[in-house]
Image: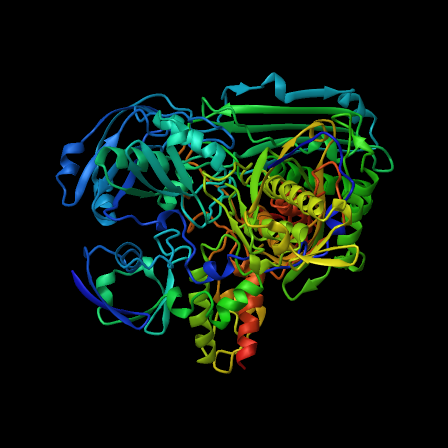
């Protein structure tokens, strides 16, 4: 099935089995292996990427559903030598150990900070309509769709908060 | 040149303290960090090869019996499917850590539900998955033992796993205070974020395998033996490993299946376990039932300890969760009974999950100690300090170094243990405080590394050691940089290639000490060579920022190396200091929980760990290892539990939706502190393992805090709401 995907600003013409998930399209067809497969069932968040500005689990979405979509993967956020602020903060704060969940964490956090900026409340927000106070609890709650078995969670929170504060 | 040390004598020279570079022990960023945060580090399933096919494993659906055949023809007719394979070489079980030979093999005998018995290979992953889901297996069911806890199950009591000392029965009768309780822990899964996967291809009789493994030296032999080929013909690569936690110590079924298929079809083949297959195929920590008897005198000093633990395992497997491992050395007591019991069961193979033994054994002991603290009315910290032995009482060995008392005091001070308020509440939340000791045996394994000092002053470190998130790239870089006075940006560390010098691998908390010591040995030899060129003693030589200084004269390293690189292979192996002394790491955990007085929900509010593990090689990565261990403890205390169907032994909660590892919101901003220690008996770096200490006892601190908050003593982990709710005080 033919699908046109714009990935990290470059248009790709994909011709793949209609059963191919967006995750497997990236990994097996387009050689973009930065996006990781951890569970293939939307349980772990390792495959998180950004589609038209919103974070999704790419294992739960078929590639053919994304014809014409703008997709940002970890490779599009920064490269060694030219890291995004979040990527840089993750290195500094050791926001990972094995590194396997990390692309998903960083894609998720990138989109999450935009959600905060846009005033989206979360389960732990005291006020559903005002500005979000980005407390540790807010960050933890909003990042709980991304599992990390190495459990770098405290460092991930530090990295995200520092990045958010740096942008203020 | 070579430099080899057998660790027969303590090394208290603390040579690393004399070095000038100032790199070791610092919180240096991981050198591979930029690759990991950009998705450019290549894990096992990412070494894509031209023309690569995809394989998906098929699982057995009976607990015991035979596989008489598979309906291959129907599946091989499906679009894109190339081949259906099964047979004698498929792994029945994954290999245990340091097995060094093939695990039990063969598709024809089925021993548990989920056993990988066949592989479907296709042009695409989607076609292979469809084929695997469609493949009909012809099976004949036999008689299974699906339930380890059923009445009348046969119990083995291996003679080597039983020990008695003194008269525990009399000690219990004479004791002023006793604890006599059963504690149970459920099965656990390592659940690394990267599923086990492999890409295999052949060049003639040479096999190249990109796999997700922790111990390449052993894994090469396991692969070769499984395939019936010469280990010389196996090239194993694992430069980045997406977590292991014990589950990747030995080879897993994906690697052998990929190699068999690649050979048969003459093209590269990839196989990645599904998340469900990770749970069903590659090791569970056995559930445990642990009977503890503590006999204490009027001052709370232990006179006796009894610890009988029952675990389960498949037939034909020698590994048994070493539950009682820390019991002989942690606390005083001249009367002891320590016993292990094993039940044979048709369930997923039991094997190493982070800190086999202490993770569950020490956790139960530390809950029992809290019960003793309550019974005696002695503060739990003070009770533990009164019970620290001078020698390992159950083994009659001296300790190499012992910092439990310091860790208890340090943790209590940082946490503010003395300031805790009894009976505190926060709205509808009941607040409680708990603590426990941490302990884990320490060891090294034979390890080799090559260090090359190049004419341009750069350093290259090479070993088949892996970095499974533990920080190997960082610490080997730091050790060499410190010893040879070379800044980080002039050092390259290459790991995870079986053609490089053979290391102990990652596991049992021995990786940093073993691989690090081999690098240290090579660097010490290089220092001696440099010193000889300057006509000075190695001890009088200062190396910093690429410059050698002796007697106020500075010489660039590049002038000393000459035209050819200086190459040394360093090696370490365990010796008498490991056999004759009890080496262990120690620590303490302190935490504050809130228990909801209406629902029984437990939220961890605060947790601190103080740890003594010899010299700390990297303050940042060591801390992260402890955060990870403590979080495994949070999971063990509150949510993690493998559930098997008692009718057929199948794992009911075989994925991350149903097996609940802690998420970000379950983990507060944990704090960690390290106690200064140099253990001369451990190795020439005086460093000890840190990868597992953080889990050993952590769960008990939480269970003890729940008791403090509510008066509910949970002895059957995890402490889910159903176990707490009935005992909650009326509000």
x and y, in percent, of residue B633 in the image = 60, 47
- From the viewer's perspective, is residue B715 above or below residue B171? below
Residue farthest top in this picture? B159
Left or right: B509 as drawn, with respect to B74: right
Q: Quadrant of residue B601?
A: bottom right
Left or right: B163 as drawn, with respect to B177: left
Please tell me which residue is depicted at 38% across the width and 51% down the height of the picture.
Answer: A39
Q: How is the image coloured?
A: rainbow
B217 and A136: which is toward the camera: B217
Left or right: B688 as drawn, with respect to B726: right
Q: Quadrant of residue B185?
A: top right
The quadrant of the image that shows the C terminus of chain B is: bottom right
Count of numbered marks: 0
x and y, in percent, of residue B699 in the image = 63, 46
x and y, in percent, of residue B207 in the image = 34, 35
Please tell me which residue is depicted at 28% across the width and 54% down the height of the picture.
Answer: A28
Asked if residue B626 can be seen in this view, the reply is no
B31 and A45: which is toward the camera: B31
The quadrant of the image that shows the N terminus of chain B is: top right
Left or right: B17 as drawn, with respect to B184: right
x and y, in percent, of residue B727 in the image = 63, 48
Asked if residue A32 can be seen in this view, the reply is yes
B458 and B88: which is toward the camera: B458
């Amino acid at each position: 099935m033919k699908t046109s995907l714009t990935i990290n600003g470059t248009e790709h013409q994909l011709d793949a089995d209609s059963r191919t998930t967006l995750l497997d399209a990236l990994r097996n067809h387009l050689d973009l292996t930065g996006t990781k497969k951890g569970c293939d069932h939307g349980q772990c968040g390792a495959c998180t990427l950004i589609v038209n500005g919103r974070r999704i689990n790419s294992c739960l979405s078929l590639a053919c559903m994304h014809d014409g979509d703008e997709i940002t993967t970890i490779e599009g956020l920064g490269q060694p030598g030219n890291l995004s602020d979040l990527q840089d903060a993750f290195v500094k704060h050791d926001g990972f150990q094995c590194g396997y969940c990390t692309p998903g964490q960083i894609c998720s956090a990138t989109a999450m900070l935009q959600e905060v900026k846009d005033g989206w409340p979360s389960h732990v927000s005291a006020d559903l309509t005002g500005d979000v106070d980005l407390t540790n609890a807010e960050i933890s709650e909003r990042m709980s769709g991304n599992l990390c078995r190495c459990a770098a969670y405290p460092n991930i929170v530090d990295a995200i908060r520092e990045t958010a504060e740096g942008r203020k | 040149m070579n430099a080899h040390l057998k660790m027969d004598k303590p090394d208290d020279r603390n040579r690393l303290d004399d070095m000038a570079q100032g790199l070791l022990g610092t919180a240096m960023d991981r050198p591979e960090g930029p690759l990991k945060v950009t998705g450019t580090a290549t894990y096992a399933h990412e070494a894509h090869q031209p023309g690569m096919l995809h394989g998906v494993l098929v699982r057995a659906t009976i607990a015991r019996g035979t596989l008489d055949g598979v309906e291959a023809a129907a599946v091989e007719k499906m679009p894109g499917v190339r081949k259906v394979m099964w047979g004698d070489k498929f792994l029945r079980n994954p290999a245990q850590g340091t097995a060094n030979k093939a695990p039990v093999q063969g598709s024809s005998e089925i021993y548990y539900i989920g056993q990988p018995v066949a592989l479907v290979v296709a042009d695409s992953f989607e076609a292979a998955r469809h084929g695997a889901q469609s493949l009909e297996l012809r099976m004949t069911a036999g008689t299974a033992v699906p339930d380890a806890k059923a009445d009348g199950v046969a119990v083995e009591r291996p003679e080597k796993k039983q020990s008695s000392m003194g008269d525990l029965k009399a000690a219990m009768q004479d004791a002023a205070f006793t604890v006599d309780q059963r504690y149970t822990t459920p099965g656990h899964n390592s659940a690394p974020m990267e599923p086990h996967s492999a890409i295999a291809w052949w060049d003639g009789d040479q096999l190249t395998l990109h796999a997700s493994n922790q111990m390449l030296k052993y894994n090469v032999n396991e692969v070769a033996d499984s395939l019936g080929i010469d280990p010389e013909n196996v090239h194993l690569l694992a430069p980045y490993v997406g977590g292991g936690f014990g589950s990747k110590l030995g080879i897993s079924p994906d690697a052998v299946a990929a190699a068999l298929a690649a050979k048969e079809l003459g093209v590269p083949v990839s196989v990645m376990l599904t998340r469900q297959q990770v749970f069903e195929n590659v090791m569970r920590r056995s559930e445990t039932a642990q009977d503890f008897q503590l006999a204490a005198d009027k001052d709370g000093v232990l006179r006796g300890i009894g610890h009988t633990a029952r675990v389960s395992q498949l037939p034909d497997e020698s590994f048994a969760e070493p539950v009682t491992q820390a019991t002989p050395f942690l606390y005083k007591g001249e009367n002891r009974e320590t016993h292990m019991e094993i039940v044979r069961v048709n369930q997923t193979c039991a094997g190493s999950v982070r800190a086999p033994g202490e993770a569950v054994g020490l956790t139960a002991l530390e809950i029992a100690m809290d019960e003793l603290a309550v019974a005696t009315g002695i503060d739990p910290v003070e009770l533990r300090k009164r019970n620290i032995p001078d020698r390992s009482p159950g083994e009659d060995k001296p300790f190499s170094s012992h910092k439990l008392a310091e860790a208890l005091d340090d943790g209590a001070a940082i946490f503010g243990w003395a300031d805790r308020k009894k009976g505190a509440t926060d709205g509808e939340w009941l607040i409680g405080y708990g603590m426990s000791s941490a302990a884990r045996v320490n060891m090294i394994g034979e390890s080799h590394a090559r260090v090359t000092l190049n004419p341009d002053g750069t350093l290259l470190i090479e070993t088949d050691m892996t970095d499974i998130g533990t920080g190997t790239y960082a610490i080997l870089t730091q050790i060499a940089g410190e010893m040879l006075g070379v800044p980080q940006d002039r050092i390259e560390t290459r790991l995870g290639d079986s053609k490089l010098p053979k290391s102990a691998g990652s596991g049992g908390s021995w990786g940093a000490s073993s691989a690090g010591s081999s690098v240290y040995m090579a660097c010490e030899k290089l220092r001696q060579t440099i010193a000889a060129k300057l006509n000075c003693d190695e001890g009088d030589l200062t190396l910093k920022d690429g410059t050698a200084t002796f007697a106020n004269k500075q010489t660039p390293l590049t002038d000393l190396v000459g035209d050819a690189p200086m190459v040394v292979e360093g090696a370490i192996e365990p010796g008498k200091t490991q056999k004759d002394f009890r080496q262990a790491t120690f620590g303490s955990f302190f935490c504050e929980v809130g228990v909801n007085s209406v629902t029984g929900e437990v939220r961890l509010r605060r947790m601190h760990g103080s740890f003594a593990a010899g010299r700390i090689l990297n303050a940042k990565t060591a801390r992260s290892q402890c955060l990870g261990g403590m979080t495994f403890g949070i999971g063990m205390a509150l949510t993690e539990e493998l559930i098997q169907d008692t009718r057929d032994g199948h794992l009911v909660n075989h994925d991350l939706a149903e097996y609940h590892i802690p998420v970000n919101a379950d983990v507060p901003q944990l704090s960690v502190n390290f106690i200064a220690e140099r253990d001369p008996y451990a190795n020439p770096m005086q460093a000890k393992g840190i990868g597992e200490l953080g889990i050993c006892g952590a769960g008990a601190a939480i269970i003890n805090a729940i008791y403090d908050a509510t008066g509910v003593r949970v002895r059957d982990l995890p402490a889910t709401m159903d176990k707490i709710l009935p005992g909650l005080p009326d509000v």
